[in-house]
Amino acid sequence: GDGRKQPAKGVPVVALEAPPRSVRLTISEAGRVMARTTVEGSRSLAEHMVPHWVSEALLAHRFYSREKAKVPFYVRQDPARSLSALQDGSSRLEALRILRMRQVVKYVAQQLSTPLPADEVGPDPVWEDHIEILCNGRVLPAEMDLYSARLLAWRNPSDDMELVYRRRLTGHELGSRDM
């Protein structure tokens, strides 16, 4: 080898056949063009204008693999909080890392083998008011995404994350437990 790191498997590689002066780059952020230059000219741009991985790929031929866009995880029942098992029995799922716990709760609500009573949830249920998701014993906020849950609550990069669903206690139930 020539000492260069090879692109990771599955990372697209664009061979630059043209001289570096003729390949044009447009750098934009939030739809606003920050700079227009060539590959060779990108060396002189301010560091904050060119993402590090772009400089590495274009100038040093170093390529980095992206993290997986999907997160594998299990959804398991907490038997102590009286919710039924999921209909299909399959609890291993894989979803985009940006999926929010709110959407996991909705999935669980739709897959319960015994649905929550209609008089308890009402005609337009807000499922997070009735079901909560935990990871390693920690209740996860409805707005947390899978990636954040894996990073902050699961903390085990080698195993699939395990999420536990259970019925959320109501204010009345919480008050009677304190007595």
Image (cartoon, rainbow, N blue to C red):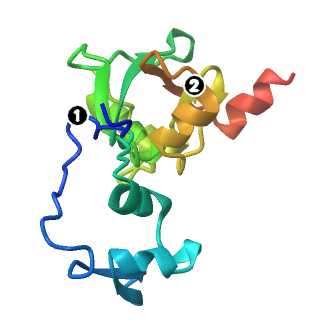
Q: Which mark is residue 53?
A: none
Residue 52 % position (x, y): 49, 60
Q: Residue 125: x and y, percent? A: 41, 49
How far apart are the two marked residues, 2 and 1, measured between alpha carbons? 27 Å
Residue 76 in the image, given as x and y percentages of width and height: 42, 16
> Which of the image's four quarters has the N terminus?
top left
Q: Is residue 88 above or below residue 106?
A: above
Judge whether 174 appears above or below 55 on screen: above
Query: Looking at the rendering, in which quadrant would you find the C terminus?
Result: top right
Instruction: Name the one closer to the observer, 156 or 132.
Output: 156
The part of the image, by quadrant, that contains residue 7 is: top left
Residue 28: image quadrant is: bottom left
Left-right relation of 176 to 86: right
Badge 2 density bin: few <14, some 14–19, many ≥20, Cα 10 Å = many
Give the secondary structure at mark 2. helix
Residue 135 image point, x, y percent? 57, 25
User: Type of residue at label 1?
Assistant: Lys
Q: Which residue is mark 2?
A: 154
Q: Residue furthest top?
A: 79
Taking the view exactly as shown, the residue that stands out farthest to the left is 17
| Type of amino acid under label 2 | Trp
Looking at the image, the residue that sits furthest to the right is 179
Mark 1: few, some, or many residues within 10 Å (few <14, many ≥20)? few
Q: Residue at x 36, y 38 (%)?
A: 5
The front one of 1 and 84 is: 1
Residue with the mark numbered 1: 9
Left or right of 35? Residue 166 is right
Q: Nearer the viewer, residue 87 or 56?
A: 56
